[in-house]
Amino acid sequence: METKLAKHKHEPEGFLRSLGTQVRRLREGAGQSIRDLARLAEISPRFLSELEAGRGNISVARLAGIAAALKQPLQALIPVSAENGSLRARVWGLIEACTPEDLEELSEWLSARQQKQFAKSIALVGVRGAGKSTIGEKVAARLAIPFIELDALIEREAGMSLVEIFTLHGEAYYRRLERDAVERLLTGSSPVVLATGGSVVTHPETWGMLRRQCHTVWLKARAKDHWNRVVAQGDLRPMGNNPSARDDLKELLRAREPLYSQAELIADTSKYSIDEVVEMIAGSWGQSVVSSR
């Protein structure tokens, strides 16, 4: 009896150590500092440090706050004991080790197995001036689903502008934020219309994720239309002091065309009106939902 009681006495300590390790792993994976996560979860940095060290006994409500700040389901923070030999525990352990590609395949298999289908999000791609924001908002209103601009989301989550992100941390850091933001968005059960950054197609991992999980649409336009639209919005950055800026834009479009062409739908915004493109996207999205059943 004394041996069993002594063992039970130490079990909470092992759980708290495992819990702290799991929280730290998810925090670091999200690229957040202890201070950042503590602020979002509305707890003190000292308490979070104690928790990650395995010395903080936390309430369920506070743990739920940390999960929300990490944009993770609560169960993702709960460690599964190595002694737990149940089938559910074994499956959860396998899921924890899955890559995003593994999870996508698993989701598709389970959906087919359970005969459940989820409407895909719509991802709009294209160079600046293609009309992603204008058309995206109209498509979202037409389908009664949210509209999200990826770069604006990244800025809010990072707490700084894109210029500051690139200046202070570099492109690799931005790409990680971009990938993580897309992954979190696509794990949601509700579809959205997502306006991506023009260069998202040059990052194979993120572009692959979008192509596999979204109804992708390339808003195509002639180089002069891209140029004129951006300038009409009052943005003179395309010209700068670069006399070959127009030629650079044409070259950029040529270089990215093979990647943009991988989208499921190509909508020429130089040829069709905004309303025509909106109906085109809404119709093709509806067909993609039906064909997936």
Image (spheres, rainbow, N blue to C red):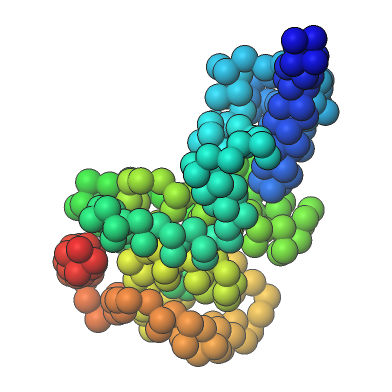
Q: Is residue 2 left or right of residue 269?
A: right
Q: Is residue 61 left or right of residue 51?
A: left
Q: Quadrant of residue 1?
A: top right
Q: Quadrant of residue 121?
A: bottom left
Residue 268 position (above or below residue 64)? below
| Residue depicted at 54% across the width and 88% down the height | 255
**The C terminus sits in image quarter:** bottom left
Question: As rendered, which of 44 and 58 lies closer to the eye?
Answer: 58
Q: Can residue 165 be seen from the camera position used here?
A: yes
Q: Quadrant of residue 129?
A: bottom left
| Residue depicted at 56% across the width and 17% down the height | 61
Q: Residue furthest front?
A: 1
Question: As rendered, which of 132 and 249 lies closer to the eye?
Answer: 132
Question: As rendered, which of 60 and 288 lies closer to the eye?
Answer: 60
**Location of residue 77 in the rendering, given as x and y in whole percent from the top left corner:** 61, 34
Q: Is residue 84 left or right of residue 106?
A: right
User: Number of labelled discs?
Assistant: 0
| Residue depicted at 66% across the width and 80% down the height | 242
Residue 109 position (above or below residue 65)? below
Q: Can residue 132 be seen from the camera position used here?
A: no
| Residue depicted at 67% across the width and 17% down the height | 58
Q: Is residue 166 left or right of residue 138?
A: right
**Location of residue 171 in the rendering, given as x and y in whole percent from the top left corner:** 71, 64
Residue 9 position (above or below residue 63)? above
**Location of residue 274 in the rendering, given as x and y in whole percent from the top left corner:** 24, 66
**Location of residue 76 in the rendering, given as x and y in whole percent from the top left corner:** 57, 38
